[in-house]
Amino acid sequence: MTLTDILEIEKDRKEEKNWDIIHLFKTGGFWSAYEWSAWLVAVVAFNDEVRMQTKDRKPLTVSRYAISNGNDNDTFCKVGFPLKSIEKFIPNRTECLVNDAKHIAIRIPIPPATPDGEPISYDYLCTTINDWRNSQQIKERGGKKNKTTAPVSQQSPHPIAQAPGGIISKILAYPLDQRTAAENMQFISELKLQITSIL
């Protein structure tokens, strides 16, 4: 499933029956959640109360990326966690709607009312999630071209090398030795997803 397919699934939220569904997609050894689902995981399921009962008490890392489509305003957020950690990050799931090798959809309880006591609405959730998304710093996907002393081939580069987001540049710029093993695995999973969407 491509990133475009996943983001289309996340946009299908107007009906109330879809407000509380988390879609998780398997990327390597991780489950990844995007956009609305990412908010449900990071804010609703793995909330402060749940998080403070864990050993490390750290919040989930939220990654926000620009979408390489020419529109500077288009971004998406995602969170990821190891496959075996679903009990930790989503302990309150109530129903499994989809369960296959690379995609699961689960339902979780969400608050029935806003902090002001008003009933939850689609517009309220959209505003809340957009505010949450916009509070996340956009991470670079790629960057400046790296200078090299190696001879440059006259042949057209492979599609991955010239892909939007500069996958090769991203790999070269990634500080592998300054990241944890989990962060490195997440990085590799993100690269795999980008490359799959190109090929």
Image (spheres, rainbow, N blue to C red):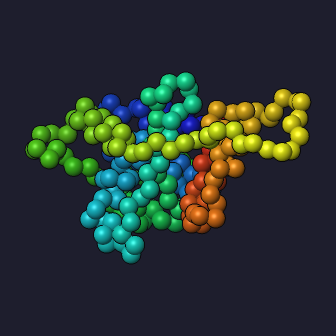
How many discs appear? 0
Residue 4 visible at all:
yes
Residue 171 lies left or right of residue 114; in this view the side is right
Residue 196 visible at all:
no
Residue 115 lies left or right of residue 191; in this view the side is left
Coordinates of residue 49 in the picture (x, y in percent): 26, 65
Residue farthest along the left direction in this orientation: 117
Q: Nearer the viewer, residue 112 or 98?
A: 112
Q: Quadrant of residue 164?
A: top right
Q: Residue at x 37, y 41 (%)?
A: 133
Q: Quadrant of residue 126?
A: top left
Q: Residue at x 10, y 44 (%)?
A: 117
**Up-down relation of residue 16 to residue 30 (above or below):** above
Coordinates of residue 161 in the picture (x, y in percent): 74, 37
The quadrant the N terminus occupies is top right
The quadrant the C terminus occupies is top right
Residue farthest along the bottom direction in this orientation: 55
Coordinates of residue 163 in the picture (x, y in percent): 69, 33
Coordinates of residue 63 in the picture (x, y in percent): 47, 48
Q: Nearer the viewer, residue 175 or 69?
A: 175
Q: Residue at x 60, y 48 (%)?
A: 190
**Up-down relation of residue 153 to residue 171 (above or below):** above
Q: Residue at x 35, y 59 (%)?
A: 46
